[in-house]
Image (cartoon, rainbow, N blue to C red):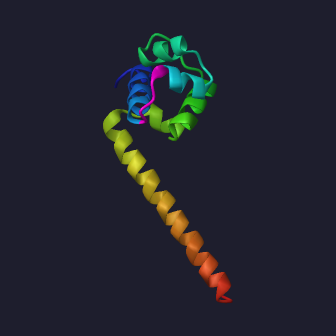
Amino acid sequence: MKDLRDIVSVNVKRFRKSRGLSQEEFAAKAGVSRNYLSKVENNASNLTLDYLQEIAKVLDVEAATLLVETGTVKKTEKAAKTIKAIRETIAVLEEDIERLGG
């Protein structure tokens, strides 16, 4: 099993780049210094749970997603999107039922 800090550093960098954000832009949005973010991405710093949560929020992913190795992350993201779509469909159906007096 890979070191958890290795996994997080790879995922943070990968998600940041996939969002088209520079380190400076991302650090500003996450409320951390660019230097700190660089250390996180290069596995040179321990990441607190508070920062992990804030970074995940800025990346628009669940914090747990950053703790999972890359191959599993894609499956997790896909499952999360599917669950979100199902919940939205259920909400629409519930509104329709309510509207129809059911």
Q: Position of residue 96 (x, y in %)?
A: 60, 81
Name the image quarter holding the N terminus.
Answer: top left
Q: Position of residue 35 (x, y in %)?
A: 52, 11
Q: Position of residue 71 (x, y in %)?
A: 31, 38
Q: Residue at x 54, y 13 (%)?
A: 36
Indicate the quadrant where residue 21 lies. top left
Main secondary structure along the magenta-highlighted residues: loop
Magenta residue check for 22: yes
The outermost residue toward the left is 71
Name the image quarter holding the C terminus.
Answer: bottom right
Q: How many marks?
A: 0
Q: Residue at x 46, y 33 (%)?
A: 66
Q: Is residue 57 above or below residue 89?
A: above
- Boundaries of the magenta span: 19-23
Q: Residue at x 41, y 53 (%)?
A: 79
Who is closer to the viewer here, 29 or 75?
29
Indicate the quadrant where residue 101 lies. bottom right
Q: Is residue 80 above or below residue 5?
A: below
Who is closer to the viewer here, 45 or 21?
21
Q: Is residue 86 above or below residue 45?
A: below
Q: Residue at x 38, y 30 (%)?
A: 14
